[in-house]
Amino acid sequence: MSLPPKPASRPDKVSLWRYARLFRADILSAQPARLYRAWMAEFRTPFFRSYLMNQPELIKTVLKDRPDDFPKSDRIGEGLRPLLGNSVFLTNGDTWKRQRRIIDPAFEGGRLRETFPAMWEAAEAAAERLAPHAGQVIEIEAETSHAAADVIFRTLFSIPIEHHLAREVFEEFKTYQRSQPLLNLAAFVPLPRWMPRFFRRGTKASAARIRRLITALTKGRMEEIAAGTAPDDLATKIMTTADPVTGARFDTEEMVDQVAIFFLAGHETSASALAWTLYLLATHPDWQDRLAEEAQVLETCDFAVMSKLRLSRDVFREALRLYPPVPMMVRESTCPERFRDRDVKPGAQLVLSPWHLHRHERLWDNPDGFDPARWGTENGQKCQREAYIPFSAGARVCTGAGFAMVEGPLILSRILRDYRVAAVPGRVPVPVAHLTVRSERGIWLQLTRR
């Protein structure tokens, strides 16, 4: 059995100019192979210094033990701010803490059960949309993107993807997704604040159109809340929750910022993870058949069914390991540090890379292989605790992590209950980093009815 696709690494030593060109094209293939074995690596240029950290103890220090000393790097927001404004994804300090105090209650455990019917309906709709394509070769990323967007609109605003505003946001997001990488080289270069930031053609205009559409949805919901006719969904919960410390609620602009990141995080990451999971199962038909058999329990909408989708959950978890939707996270040191006998100055960029950590040759058994059974092994369980961060970790762990681990296995199982997917010869997807880890030319699968 061949290993799942992985981008080729660059030569160990290249010129700064060559590295910049490679980085601009794709951050995954721009890195040397030694990072899959390194505990810590230092990158020096005339403009900045950064450190990639793979050692579990260092990651724990940065994300869990002292998160306030290592805030999210402001430079990472340079490319995303036109869309996300001051969303919880980009803020730090007291602003971020206030935002999380308002947002987190909407995603507490009990709310998952309440939002499950909307997820179930989205999964049913996804399976129905595939019916006309049975017997055809299809680009599965487009389908998983549609399904994930449907989940977001149903759970957040109680509207299906067919609603005209939801459809417009979805279509505009497809344009934005391909134009804007999650990280770009400019994010790592300490440019003066007064210097203008440059974006790819159309990126800022696309972001502005998305924000206008989200503003219309948000204002509409505020009117419903005032009239007492608002549905009890995630948007209503967040918009009516007061900060327990200050008593303030989100105003319209703040809510638009948060909806933008919910859509980006909830839609982009789930779409990426589902597409790669289906590809992995297309190339491992034995696992696919086991999931299809398990999926026969999906008969009526009942949250209790999730406890029966154990194999689906393990497979989805393995796909998140091999293809973490957000491949790299960047923090900034705020005080002098000494890590692994290196002096790290304030302002240094600390890169935490799920992409490298999840495939680290000194941590994982069979790091590049697809093995959902690993989660039951001693090595898999140890690595899950110490070297598995698809949703980040610590104080800034993704608010929607639990949400994603219900949505992903549910939609995956619902599709495989009715359909079989097979890889298309000659069309092996190549992972690249756009807003999330996607395939350079799409993920093409043969779809047939079971």
Image (tube, rainbow, N blue to C red):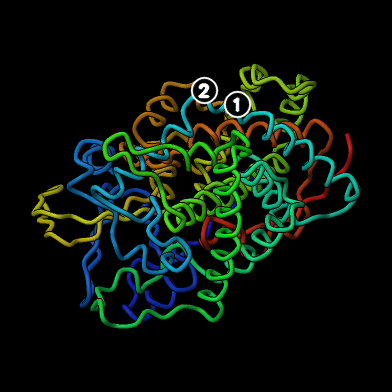
**Residue in front for this viewpoint, 51 or 306:** 306
Query: In the displayed structure, would residue 246 be above or below residue 253?
Result: above
The type of residue carrying mark 1 is Glu
User: Which residue in the protein does label 1 denote?
Assistant: 114
List x then y, in percent, for residue 339: 14, 48
In contact (CB < 8 Å): disc 1 and disc 2: yes
Picture quadrant of residue 56: top left
The spot of residue 22 in percent (x, y) is: 44, 73
Q: Residue at x 50, y 61 (%)?
A: 8
Q: CA distance from mark 1 to mark 2?
A: 7 Å
Closer-to-camera residue (15/57): 57
Residue 138 in picture, x, y percent from top left? 80, 55
Q: Quadrant of the N terminus?
A: top right
Residue at left 9%, top 56%?
343
Residue indicated by mark 2: 110
- The answer to which quarter of the image holds residue 49 is bottom left
